[in-house]
Amino acid sequence: MKKYLLTLLIIVNLFASEQRIITLSPSLNEIVFALGSGKDIVANTQYCNYPEESKNIPKVGGYASISLEKMLKAKPTLVLAQNYDEQLLVNLKKLNLNYHSFKTDNLKSIKTTIKSVAKLVGKQQKAQELTSNIDKKLKELSNIVTNKKILIVISPRKELNKSIYVTGNNLYFNDIINASGNKNAYKSKSLAQPVVNVEKIIHMNPDIIILLAPYIHDNKISFKQLKKPWRKLPVKASKNDNIYIIDKEYAGIPSHRIVYFMEDFKEILVNVRDK
């Protein structure tokens, strides 16, 4: 009798732990997979393409085109969303869906999100591994080179036009730069996406410029072509040949994979030091 009750209890717990998860951003999708619960994702968005199996999961739309009808058809028990789409969150509440929203802009919020999602899916131990790895990689950046002004450019083009997107002071890039003993060349208290022009970049005079260009190969642009206009700028980075490109998509995804960006960032700092 005891053996029968024990078996029944195990079966009940297994069914109780099953989730039907919808992830509404690439970062949350990656985190769920990293925690070991990717098999429970029944829908995600069209930009959720990592890991590879994410591409075959039914899609419910893009960043600004989430289909509530498709979400309901997926019959989710748990919906994971970012905090920036307030109207979407209002709609999820109206539909009485079990949703949780997260902020993933700086390192602290990314680690908090990993731990919070882990509690929802029962994978706290794995979350500890992921966040500890982030802390470990961050420490490895310290004092390779110091007091350098670093400018990180988002999706640069072959020509330097009036609208150049750079990373501000409220994102994880800024945290990583500061942890390395250096400083962001761009300074502002504004939370808005920074947009600068060539004159502003010359005024900042960065020591190191890092171009985040994950789609460079899709656009058939070579590293040489992309660097060319930047090398002409009268700034320290161009004079000392300290212009670098990171062409990996993970660099712009605020998930556990920021550790890979840290590894690339470390290589750049070592290269600058050893010149």
Image (spheres, rainbow, N blue to C red):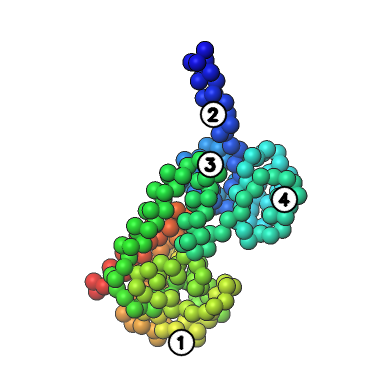
Real-space Cα distance between discs 2 and 1? 60 Å
Amino acid type at circle 1 is His
Percent position (x, y) of residue 135? Answer: 37, 58
The residue that disc 2 covers is 14
8 versus 23 height, above or below: above
The residue that disc 4 covers is 93
| SS under mark 4 | helix
| SS under mark 2 | helix
Name which residue lies at 55% across and 44% down.
120
Q: Nearer the viewer, mark 2 or mark 1?
A: 2
Does residue 256 show up? yes
Position of 175 compared to 116: left or right? left
The residue that disc 3 covers is 121
Quadrant assignment, res 272: bottom left
Q: Earlier in the sequence, mark 3 or mark 4?
A: 4
Amino acid type at circle 2 is Leu
Real-space Cα distance between discs 3 and 4? 20 Å
